[in-house]
Image (tube, coloured by chain):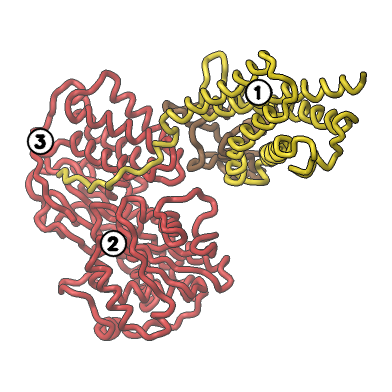
Chain colours: A brown, B yellow, C red
Amino acid sequence: MGEVLEIDRIRCDGHGLCAELLPELISLDDWGYPIIKPGKVPPSVVEHARRAVDACPVLALRLARTAAAVAR
Amino acid sequence: MSDTILWYATRGAGVVSLILLTGVVVLGIVSAMRWQTAAWPRFLTTGLHRNLALATLVFLAIHIVTAVVDPFTALGWQAAIIPFSSSYRRLWLGLGVVAIYLLLAIVVTSLLRPYFGQSAWRAVHWLTYVMWPVAVIHGIGTGTDPRFAWMLAIEAGCIGSVVAAVAWRATAAPHAAWRRLPAASPQAQKWS
Amino acid sequence: MELIARAAGAESLAAHLQRLGPMPALPSGALIAELEASGLLGRGGAGFPVGRKWRAVAERAAGGAVVLANGAEGEPLSLKDRSLMAARPHLVIDGALLAARAVGANDIIFYVGGEHATAQAALRQALAERPGDVRRRTRIVTAPAGYVSGEESAAVHYVNAGDARPTTTPPRPFERGVGGRPTLVQNVESLALAALIARRGHAWYQGLGHGRARGIGLLTVSGAVNRAGVHEIELGATLSDAAAAAGGLRGDVRAVLLGGYFGGWADLHEQWGLPLDAPSMRARGLALGCGVVHFLASGTCGVEATAQLMTYLASQSARQCGPCVFGLSAIAGAAQRLAAQSAQPGDLDRIVRWSRQVTGRGACHHPDGAAALMQSALQVFADDFVGHQHRRCLTISQPARVAVA
């Protein structure tokens, strides 16, 4: 099954902590907003992904267990 | 002999708590201001903010326990749990109890933020601007010694840094300004 | 003509019933089956199969669903929805009532753009002609002006909270919408067509259309034509047929905007024989969208036109998502610099990069549509853009300022 990173684009305020803590999957665009690599989170970085979700100042990120969810 | 040690422990832990708490508040503002450099990423600010807050709780625990068990102060646990119930310096001590409850609310909602939700967390977190002044006033009001220069210096330093940080935040442009809709919605241009 | 009329004024209930007969008493399952068999596609812009949408809501409804007839028509170049509501309001109401029966809804909302005064008045008058039980279940909600207020989650958000801005999905309205209940958000033209299919059967609808396309639909033809306005066609009619229906082209035309601001540019000579139906157009990388066909006169500069389009689209962002607000503003800024022949070096490359960056990174599809429009302009007006980058306009710009709405 695996886990997928989902983002609430309206909540996201471009703080950028997620990109600091999970550079493997998240980079920032020209204006500081996250670009998330689509697909399942590799098991090797799942713990870092959890930290990134926890660190978001506005709780815009979440880890979803369903494989049907797609990160935008 | 042991009485004196307890008394010094109470005051010492209290001063350390004040310094740590001041650091927590300033770091919280630094985080909200999104300050960062190449060498100091944002997660460092938020991580320190969190860890110093938890360290503060440890020193506050020492501060409270030593104060209560000290036979010299005859405070008892009630004074530490029910605000304004002590016979000794009722008002100033009571403020300390209030500050502790506010701090606990802030810490608990932060540790369990996903369960409380973002709006509840934010609302409680803003209580920091009540909690910190109340803690400072408690410290000043319960001080029994003549004012030592170093104690005054510490207090001035703490108050000064928070005032400076608040002024920095208050005069900055709001970060969410881009969300505001412009005054009038323009009509589609006639272009062909 | 089924959906629009030559005569002015709204069709009364008596005339509507005389022309079409009584509304059929099809049970919910049979009605949905008819729509699925007809292959009717939604007319709001997305082109989603109507029967499948009704089924999805019906499956979740348990009797408490809501129908939202979407007549917001925020697309500046589109006139079909307001014309339809103004001319045949009872057909739209029939469609909404049938939808309500099909999905199990007792609450019907007509979400009509505030600027469409004639359409609103016609609907109001038409509802007043209906019996009490229909009046009790229906209401008209005035949609605020603005491009995104017709987006389905924005419509639901407005009804729920007075805020016509899109919301994060999931959940989509068909799962949780007005009042938290499964909501069918359907374009008014789709509802009108459903009302016709309910009376005449799916075979009637399938019997219409050219080539491989099935059915009929409304187009708003505008720009360099002699008789701009709303025209009803059999789907699969070509772009040249649409021009002919609009009285023929006025002068030399080289490009056409298909699907509106949410669509894209196409080269007229390449697409003169293009069948106008959603699947055929999608196969060619184009979109029928809400049926806008706007012909750009050769004397009008495509770069300037696109810059104005992008500026408008950037201004219409709901301002909820960073990539949309900053990305569209940046693209529009660069497009304006190019139009004014004062582009910075690298502006064209920046536009391409930014268009890729904003796509799929907003809560709704507004940035995607704007980026797609920009990409199509870069393709169709490639030479013009390069010319402008080198401070030369290949077209002598003649702003004809023909009012469309």
Q: Which one is in front, C139 or B109?
A: B109
* Crowd class of label 1 (few under 14; some 14 to 19; many from 20; radius 10 Å): some
* Left or right: residue C362 compared with residue B143: left
All told, the count of numbered labels is: 3
* Left or right: residue A9 compared with residue B148: left
Which SS class for mark 3?
A: loop
Q: Which residue is mark 1?
A: B48
Q: Residue at x 33, y 72 (%)?
A: C92
Q: Nearer the viewer, mark 2 or mark 1?
A: 1
Write down the quadrant of residue C122 in the picture: bottom left
Q: Which residue is mark 2?
A: C114
Residue C337 percent location from the top left of the image? 22, 27
Measure how far apart labels 2 and 3 are at the Cα level: 34 Å
Identified by mark 3, the residue type is Ser
Q: Most extreme residue toward the front, as rendered?
A: B146
- Subunit under mark 3: C
Res. C387 visible in picture: no
Q: Residue at x 36, y 54 (%)?
A: C149
Whichever of callouts 2 and 3 sits on the residue coming sooner in the sequence is 2
Seen in the picture, residue C388 relative to C88 is either above or below; the reply is above
Asked if badges 2 and 1 are on one and the same chain, I answer: no
Residue C98 percent location from the top left of the image? 43, 75
